[in-house]
Image (spheres, grey):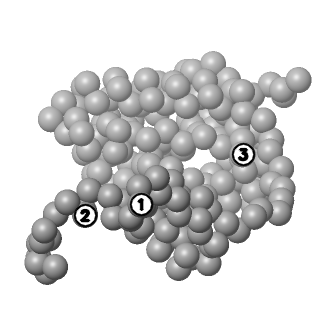
Amino acid sequence: MLDKPRIGVFVCECGINIAGTVDCDELTEWASTIPDVALAIKNRYTCAEPGQEEIKHYIREKNLNRVVVASCTPRMHESTFRNCCADTGLNPYLFEMANIREHCSWVHSHDREGATEKAKDIIKIAVARARFLEAQEELEVPVTRAALVVGAGIAGIQTSLDLADAGYQVYLVEREPSIGGLMTHINKSFPTMD
Ligand code: SF4
């Protein structure tokens, strides 16, 4: 049984990267009205030290049990914000990220109103996901450090080399009698003309 969600939504302006297009004041005010959202605030730069401290502060002060950061791609700062949660004792997997920069402000810079509405949808979806998040524990399991690469064309060969450089035992299989794939039909290749 999940505990009753108390979700904190942190809207990042990213300087003008997001705030230059999306109306972050309106977005934050709107986010505070979503059911189960206990707090919605905006930050100038959420990933900067003051932004991170604000997240930790409000997790404690408002007793938040889920956190949504509306900012950039999770590839950049998902781990940053998960660590903020963990620092307060909140399980880091009770965190969800809403990408309102790459998926919104950067691609709709000509349409402030439309971008703001889209950002609302993105946050609404993230909050919906956050409601059903459950605490996760990280486990370590033994893995076989070996890889099977099927197909010895250029992609398969390069993949095999990269894996081998990374320390994996590689098994490269090819159905044809020789390796090289389509490259074997090419006489010369640019720029080396080999
Ligand atoms: S969290 Fe992402 S969107 Fe926000 S300031 Fe940092 S880089 Fe920009």
Question: Mark 2: is the Cβ under 8 angstroms from ligand 1?
Answer: no
Compared with residue 15, is residue 19 higher up or lower down, i.e. above or below?
above
Figure label count? 3
* Residue type, label 3: Tyr
* Residue type, label 2: Thr
Compared with residue 19, is residue 123 higher up or lower down, i.e. above or below?
above
> How dense is the environment of label 3, judged by Cα within 10 Å: few (below 14), some, or many (20 and up)?
some
- Pointer 2 residue: 184
Where, quadrant-wise, is the N terminus in this rendering? top right
> How dense is the environment of label 2, judged by Cα within 10 Å: few (below 14), some, or many (20 and up)?
few
Residue at the image position 51 percent from the left and 24 percent from the top: 124
- Pointer 1 residue: 177
Question: Mark 3: is the Cβ under 8 angstroms from ligand 1?
Answer: no
Q: Considering depth in this image, is 184 or 163 the residue closer to the camera?
A: 184
The answer to whether one can see residue 108 in this image is: yes
- Pointer 3 residue: 93
The answer to whether one can see residue 89 in this image is: no
Are the residues at dot 1 and dot 3 in contact (C-beta closer than 8 Å)? no
Residue at the image position 11 percent from the left and 78 percent from the top: 193
The label nearer to you, 3 versus 2, is 2
* Residue type, label 1: Pro
Marks 1/3: CA–CA distance:
49 Å
